Image: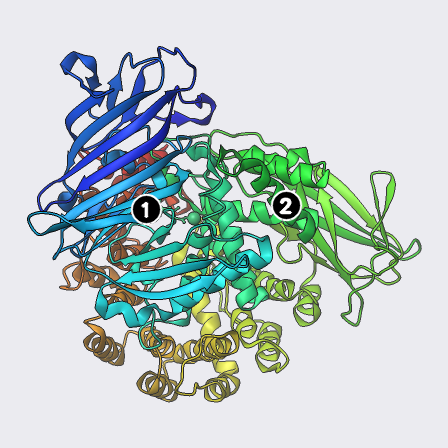
Amino acid sequence: PKEIFLKDYKLPYYYFDTVDLKFSLGEEKTFVSSKISVIPRVEGSSAPLVLNGQDLNLVSAKVNEKELKDGDYLLDSRHLTLPSPPSSVFTLEIVTEIYPQKNTSLEGLYKSSGNFCTQCEAEGFRKITYYQDRPDIMARYTCRIEADKALYPVLLSNGNLVEQGDLEDDRHYALWEDPFKKPCYLFALVAGKLESRDDSFITRSGRKVSLRIWTPSQDLPKTGHAMYALKAAMKWDEDVFGLEYDLDLFNIVAVPDFNMGAMENKSLNIFNSKLVLASPETATDADYAAILGVIGHEYFHNWTGNRVTCRDWFQLSLKEGLTVFRDQEFSSDMGSRTVKRISDVSKLRIYQYPQDAGPMAHPVRPHSYIKMDNFYTVTVYEKGAEVVRMYKTLLGSQGFRKGMDLYFQRHDGQAVTCEDFFAAMRDANDAEFSNFLLWYSQAGTPMVKVTSSYNAEAHTFSLKFCQEVPPTPGQPVKEPMFIPVSVGLLDSTGKDIPLSSVHHEGTLQSIAKDGQPVYSTVLRVTKKEEEFVFADVHERPIPSLLRGFSAPIRLESDLADSDLFFLLAHDSDEFNRWEAGQVLARKLMLTLVADFRQKKPLVLDPKFVHGLGSILRDPSLDKEFIAKAITLPGEGEIMDMMDVADPDAVYAVRVFIRKQIAQELKGDLISTVENNRSSDVYVFNHDNMARRALKNTALVYLAALDDPECTALAMHEYQTAANMTEQFAALAAIAQNPTKTREEVLADFYSKWQHNSLVVNKWFALQATSDIPGNVENVRNLLNHPAFDLRNPNKVYSLIGGFCRSPVNFHTKDGSGYKFLGEVVVQLDKINPQVASRMVSAFSRWRRYDKTRQNLAKAQLEMIMSTNGLSENVFEIASKSLA
Ligand code: HT7
Ligand code: ZN
């Protein structure tokens, strides 16, 4: 397979001005006609016009209405080339025949539950017609759809509906016109039996926008939350960024078969149903929160992605990092900022840090790819969002907004690069931070060591930073990064000390602003080694470092455990209170893992239990914060910190600590459950979600004890739960232990929910991620369960993806977990390469384990590589994992 490089980017030789599409949808095949007005970039150019195409049957091609004959064009399995097209504006007409019914890749035009839909990002439009399938080709589209009227009463595409009517043979048509120029990856079409929930939004300039959410009729009652989220997102973007919606209609369609979460097609967002449908009985608080975030995300793309798009796919983070940042801020404003930040940072640590330290490590802007689909990663999305957040940290809210305004002013309607975004931020603020751009080009998580010292005579407090960016594939040597480190200093009573000034490289910089005291400041760490000395510090302070997680780094400080306990109890930065607890927990777990490996008896530090107990009992704290603060770091995070990851030891230690905490805080945990029961009415707001989160966390701790009292309590919560959040948490609590009750409750849950496929997916995931001994066989059996379907990505993500997250069963020492995954990947690759390559990624960290496990995992990767007809998607991940 061919690797594509950023350095090879060339402007296109031809632009497309208008594109008129016509789809004639049929039961066996579909005809697609396109009429494109082509403009040579340079008048008189004699360059060939190369169009991408895949799995297409070419029916005809015309240039300026003249049919092309065999020698007029070249056709191979991936391209249609016109060797010498006209040298000035011309019309190109192409007709292709495609087979959406057979398209299991869910890319291009395909069928889902009897309805037609499209997915064109990144390079799926080439499966519909021959086209220059690259985002810098922006054109104005019309789309005429013709289909059987009874089977497909609803016909949707981008923009405005300009005409519709009946045709012969019980068919009908609709003509859509999108007034905005767009790249083809934003094209969409939907045809099917759907109904809509209708609402409207009045923009701040007084325009009425019709909002429609389309689903099969039986699901319509579950679209209320999605509509609420959409309207909230529209209002938020106006309030926070001054960005208004630009058409009179906004459609969302929910489909059950979708490779990712959702797609921001212009005015016709297509969503995975799990991110639209919710009712208190069937969806958890986490589902409700995800719907809010993703509806927001796709809506925000209308400006960051659609109005201003990417020049090429290497710039993906330009739209994705920025839009993730925007959806994170939106969710923060709609709920608790601290809790949202904790969740986002946890996600980064659990998923992105391992990627940054493994064979698939790549910069936020990758340098090359074989298959672009493989670069829709946590690095491009979540680390990319952290990069955007750092602009805001450095420039302040107002400075960031000025940068955004300038970005839209300069680039509306264009396809641009990450440098263009950087330049807008810089120029709007007269800022000087050129080596900030390294965040786009250097992979790897910077490691920053901090040492502190207090000078009681000079009343100064020094922080010395030393940074190192680890080598990553293709980047053995790194330059120092520009790292914003937000810092506060606590006095002995736990209050923030006012910061007056700091010495840095021979200058004394004032921190206080306009005579007002300042309690947090952002240090700009830009060198390999650097010292900052705070002046006027009249007692030895405890530093609160990297407040709010101001940069995506690994920070190692010389703080003693007593300092961390102090920060846990007092830091005004709530994120850092949580973080202090996590640092303590990580240290403790690593020590116990070492003890376990040396067969020493495990003893839990009573100070740690005491610290958690104080948090649990503190009525002044937000309940969701408490839930997060008493949750231990996951196994993956601890394994990540070991020279050789030992899943069995980490798992055993985590279970030991959890049981110990449950035992020692049993009384508090029981009252936490009892005092936080819900009323019958489900309310989606922070206070109610926080209460449920705390209750569920306490219940899971208690059930770990596997004693009759706690099991009875969990059963009671399961049976009396009035919503899925509590019912599922009680089920998960009970399912921790390999008992008969577990089997009974799992069976009961399935029989209750067997007709709701989204709930059944939760049931699959719960069993797949389970740590109960010997679960590989169980999961293997579930592959044959009547409700399982390898063609449905949600089912695969629940069962197979869930299984790969189980620290003990996936990594079973006999290799049965790896063998299972290897076999599934080979089977799945023939159906859906995008999903298969997501699954094969679970092998990518095989070198982190002991020799026995390494050999077993490697053997599976080699088996996959030797499979005939392997997709480029899986090839890229498997080969890079082995390299
Ligand atoms: N921009 C969307 C990306 C997407 C996608 C990419 C590859 C394959 C299938 C896909 N479905 C959606 C989603 C987003 O980030 O908003
Ligand atoms: Zn996105």
Kindly give the residue lying farthest to the left in the view shown: 169
Of 773 and 366, nearer the camera is 366
Regarding mark 2 in the picture, which secondary structure is present there? helix
Q: Return the residue at label 2.
A: 391
Of 659 and 328, nearer the camera is 328
Q: Position of residue 755 (x, y in %)?
A: 19, 71
Q: Quadrant of residue 536?
A: bottom right
Quadrant occupied by the N terminus? top left
In the rendered view, tell whether residue 493 sits above or below residue 190.
Answer: below
Regarding mark 1 in the picture, which secondary structure is present there? helix
Of 485 and 187, nearer the camera is 187
In the rendered view, tell whether residue 342 sits above or below residue 32.
Answer: below
Q: Is residue 36 left or right of residue 627?
A: left
Badge number at residue 838: 1
Q: Quadrant of residue 743?
A: bottom left
What's the amino acid at mark 2? Tyr
Quadrant occupied by the C terminus? top left
In the rendered view, tell whether residue 736 sits above or below residue 337.
Answer: below
The residue located at (25%, 29%) in the rendering is 130
The residue located at (28%, 52%) in the rendering is 258
The tag earlier along the polypeptide, 2 or 1, is 2
| Label 2 beta carbon less than 8 Å to ligand 2 | no
Badge number at residue 777: none
Q: Position of residue 781 (x, y in %)?
A: 17, 61
Camera sees residue 877:
no
Dot 1: few (<14), some (14–19), or many (≥20) neighbours within 10 Å? some
* Mark 2 vs mark 1, CA separation in Å: 31 Å
Dot 2: few (<14), some (14–19), or many (≥20) neighbours within 10 Å? many
